[in-house]
Amino acid sequence: MGHIPGADGSSYPLYPWQELERVVADLKAISAGVAPTEADLGEAPTLVRWTPSVMPIPCLVGYVEDHPRLGDGRLISTSMLWCINYERRWARTHSRWYQLGQGIDQGRPLS
């Protein structure tokens, strides 16, 4: 299996099957009415001044807080956005859960 080089010198698997399986399990739980647990969100970084965005894939763009690899205060684009709940203020991307702080438009989705 090949790897994609990361900007920080690390590399990421070209076919991250285990990561995708976790996303699928989370999406199945969401569709069954099960929200992320406090433990899921307790370890999740927080995006502030975020807004939905589009790369060639749907994602979120915002300033991250408490990210395990990226730290605090960096403007980031998330990995692929699979699911978002504006009311409960969470999102599931391909790589992880995010808690959603205040959005770029005072916490209201952009229309």
Image (spheres, grey):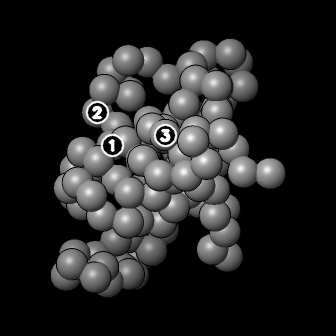
Q: Secondary structure at mark 3?
A: loop
Q: Label 3 belongs to which residue?
A: 102
First in sequence, mark 3 or 2: give its number: 2
Q: Position of residue 85 (x, y in %)?
A: 64, 32
Q: Position of residue 31 (x, y in %)?
A: 72, 25
Q: Any mark on residue 82, and which?
A: none
Task: Identify the residue at horizontal 70%, vertical 18% (top origin).
Answer: 32
Q: Secondary structure at mark 1?
A: loop
Residue 96 makes an appearance in the image: yes
* 50 or 67, nearer to the observer: 50
Task: Identify the residue at horizontal 47%, vertical 52% (top origin).
Answer: 49
Q: Residues within 10 Å of mark 3 (few under 14, many from 20)?
A: some
Say which of marks 3 and 2 sits in front: 3
Q: Residues within 10 Å of mark 1 (few under 14, many from 20)?
A: many
Q: Position of residue 77 (x, y in %)?
A: 47, 66
Q: Label 2 belongs to which residue?
A: 43
Please say if 84 is above or below 11. Answer: above
Please say if 34 is above or below 98. Answer: above
Q: Label 1 belongs to which residue?
A: 45
Task: Identify the residue at horizontal 19%, vertical 81% (top origin).
Answer: 9
Q: Residues within 10 Å of mark 2 (few under 14, many from 20)?
A: some
What amino acid type is highlighted by mark number 2? Glu
1 relative to 110 in the view: left or right = left
First in sequence, mark 1 or 3: give its number: 1
Marks 3 and 2 in Cβ contact (< 8 Å): no
Say which of marks 1 and 3 sits in front: 3
What amino acid type is highlighted by mark number 1? Pro
